Amino acid sequence: MKILVVATWYPHDENPTEAPFNSEHVEAIRGRGHEVRVIHVRLGTTLAMPRQSSGLWEGTPVRRVAADPKRPSTVLAASRTLAKEMAWADVVHTMAFSSILVTMMPWAARALTGRRPAWVHTEHWNGVVNPASVSPLWAKLSWVRGVLRLPHVVTGVTGQLTREMQRFARPHAAVVVPCVVKARGAVVPSSFGTPLRLAAVGGLIARKRPLEAVRAIAWLRDHGTDVHLTWVGEGPLRGECEALVARLGLEDQVTLTGSVRPAEVAGQLSDADLFFLPTAQENFFTSAAEALAAGRAVVATRVGGFSDYADGSNSRLVDDVSPETLGGAVLDARDAFKDVPAGDIAGPIRERFSPEAVGELFDRAYTAALARA
């Protein structure tokens, strides 16, 4: 099939980590033998346009266009580009909620020619599940989610997200298609030595709760556990985190690495015994899935759709972020998983979220959309 992907977020040379889940989905789709083109619509003015307007990204043709509502001519030009590309496509596949907004008018205009492609939409955004977690303004405007009725099939990366989308979508249109979780090298056995090594991967932002994580490390130390946390990621709370680490005397127990390349993230996970991140809200929770794919059990909060795959067989999820609850969960996970082979934890995740498995699910979504178009 000819698949036209429309995404308002997509990796580029200046920011190769922008929405990598979109490009990984594209890779999975191409792996099924489909011909794929990507239109990256840079929506609004808060982010600069990538310098390269067209070219290949990991083997896929990508065309990048601006659509700034403050400059209506750019919106019209983007719509013309989308309408022209839709004439080529069998299926238009939008990725991220705002991509629906830029696609719906040119897609509707295709009806004048008598041929509109089938439409599949893929969603990752927490704002669809929990608008209030984004902003009070979005909570008031969240009725806009009604546009989810336009695509013939909508896919969500978790069951929780899919159930919420079905409230707005066409009857029986919502299905789960998870993120791709790449297996980065062989699974390395855990040591569970001294100190107990924990890894967190996420921004130093309030939603990821790094301060709560640091307090849990202090609790573990104060209760006799030799422990070390490596936090991979950067953000506005770095200064506050560093101050708390110093105040609690945890300079030897906590390392803030800042942002690192994906290959280095994989190395940090392999060096750890457990993944530990008391996040406030997630959907798929890619970093936790990557930790499991590396054979590392997860300690986290029960706050999102990632309970699709994180359960008692590979994780410890808690409902409270007090230091004693988080610290107790770390100790429970240590005792539960220290003798479990890392490969036993990694194997099911690597198989379930492989590009091949995800690509097959998209095949089914395309077939269903074409039948409904």
Image (spheres, rainbow, N blue to C red):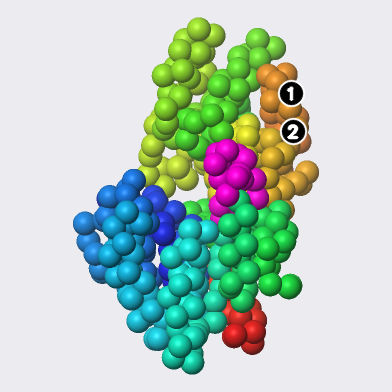
For the residues marked 1 and 2, what is the alpha-carbon distance in whole angstroms?
7 Å
Q: Is residue 127 visible?
A: no
The boundaries of the magenta stretch are 124-141
Question: What kind of element bears circle 1?
Answer: helix
In the image, residue 89 above or below residue 75:
below
In the image, residue 172 above or below residue 351:
below
Amino acid bearing label 1:
Thr
In the image, residue 265 above or below residue 161:
above
**Residue drawn at 64 percent across, 84 percent down:** 372
Give the x, y percent position of residue 199.
54, 33
For residue 16, side relative to residue 94 (left or right): left
**Residue drawn at 50 percent across, 7 percent down:** 247
Numbered mark located on residue 115 in the image: none
Between 168 and 32, the one nearer to me in the picture? 168
Q: Is 59 inside the magenta-drawn segment?
A: no
Q: Is residue 76 visible?
A: yes
In the image, residue 155 above or below residue 328:
below
Question: What kind of element bears circle 2?
Answer: strand
Numbered mark located on residue 325 in the image: 1
Between 104 and 15, the one nearer to me in the picture? 104
Give the x, y percent position of residue 191.
60, 34
Q: Residue furthest bottom?
A: 114
Give the x, y percent position of residue 30.
45, 75
* Nearest to N terminus: mark 1 or mark 2: 2
**Residue drawn at 41 percent across, 59 percent down:** 8
Q: Residues within 10 Å of mark 1 (few under 14, many from 20)?
A: some
Q: Residues within 10 Å of mark 2 (few under 14, many from 20)?
A: some
**Residue drawn at 61 percent across, 44 percent down:** 139
Residues at discs 1 and 2 in contact (Cβ within 8 Å): yes
Check disc 2 and report the residue beneath it.
318
Between 10 and 172, the one nearer to me in the picture? 172
